[in-house]
Image: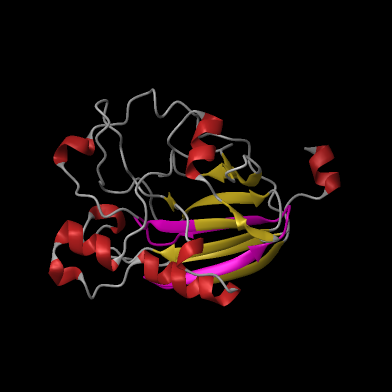
Amino acid sequence: MSTMTDPASTTSAPSASVASAPFTAEPAVLGTELRREPVAPRAPWSARIPAGQVLTIVDLDGNQAVDFLAYDAEDTARAYSVQATLQGQDSVYLTAGSVLRTHEYDPLMTVVATDVERHDTLGGACSKESNTLRYGHHTWSQHGCADNFLAELSKYGMGKRDQVSNVNWFMNVPVDPDGALGIVDGISAPGLSVSLRAERDTLVIVSNCPQINNPCNGFNPSRTEMIISAGATDTQKQEG
C-alpha cells in the first residue's frame, strides 16, 4: 500500500503498454478447502503454504488493499522480487497467469484466478515514516503495513532486513503515459478474490492495509478472508 498522493490526473485508465496481460483465466481447481480465517481491518496474517496448495484472498467488504510478501519457506533469503517478476512478464501489473518470482527468477507462486483485472506491484507499503513524509507529522502515530509485516516476520525469526518489496492485491495504481503514478479508488467489490498456487513451500506474510490517508481502502479499512485449499490432485490435473 503506497503513501503517494492521489492526483486527479491519475484517474485515467493505464496505457495498453503496461496493462497488456489478460486477466481472464480458466477456473482454477482449488481442491478441498483446508483452512479459512478472517483477517480483521488493519491486522496482519501469515502462513506457510506447501507446494501445490492454493491461497485465496477474499475482499469481503470491497475496496480493501491487501499488502503481501512471499518467501521460499526453506530459504527465506529467496524472497519475492518485484524486478524479476515484472521483467519475467513484461507488465507492471499482476493478473491471471502472473508468476511471482525470486531475484533468481525461480517461481514462488502463480496467480491461478482473479476476479479483479489487475493488481499493483509499484505502490509499496505504508509506514510511520512514509506517512509523515507524505501526509504530515500528525500521522506519525498511525499504524502502518510496515508494523504489521515486522510483527509477523518476527514469528519466523526475521526482521527489518528481511522485508522486501510487496504486492498490493486489489489496489488500483494507474500508470499514466508520462510515468506518473497515483492512488485512486479500488476496482474490487465485496466478495471478489484472487487465488495463488504455491510453486514451492512458500511463507506468506499479509498486512490487511490500515491506510486512511488515501483512497486505497476507501478511507475505511475493512475485513478480508484467507482460504487455503489443497490444490488439484494429479488425477484432477490429468482430467483438466
Query: Which residue: 19% across, 49% down?
Result: 5
Q: Which residues are magenta?
A: 40-68
User: Nearest the camera: 119 or 69?
Assistant: 69
* Residue 43 within the magenta-colored segment of the rendering: yes
In which quarter of the view is residue 31 placed? Answer: bottom right
Query: Which residue: 24% across, 42% down?
Result: 182
Query: Which residue: 21% across, 37% down?
Result: 10
Quarter of the image with the C terminus in it: top right
User: Nearest the camera: 154 or 226?
Assistant: 154
Left or right of 232: which side holds 87?
A: left
Residue 55 rendering spot, x and y as whole percentages: 61, 57
Residue 222 appears in the rendering:
no
* Residue 127 within the magenta-colored segment of the rendering: no
Asked if 159 appears above or below 186 in the picture, the reply is below
In which quarter of the view is residue 172 placed? Answer: top left
User: Nearest the camera: 161 or 130?
Assistant: 161
Asked if 144 appears above or below 79 in the picture, the reply is below
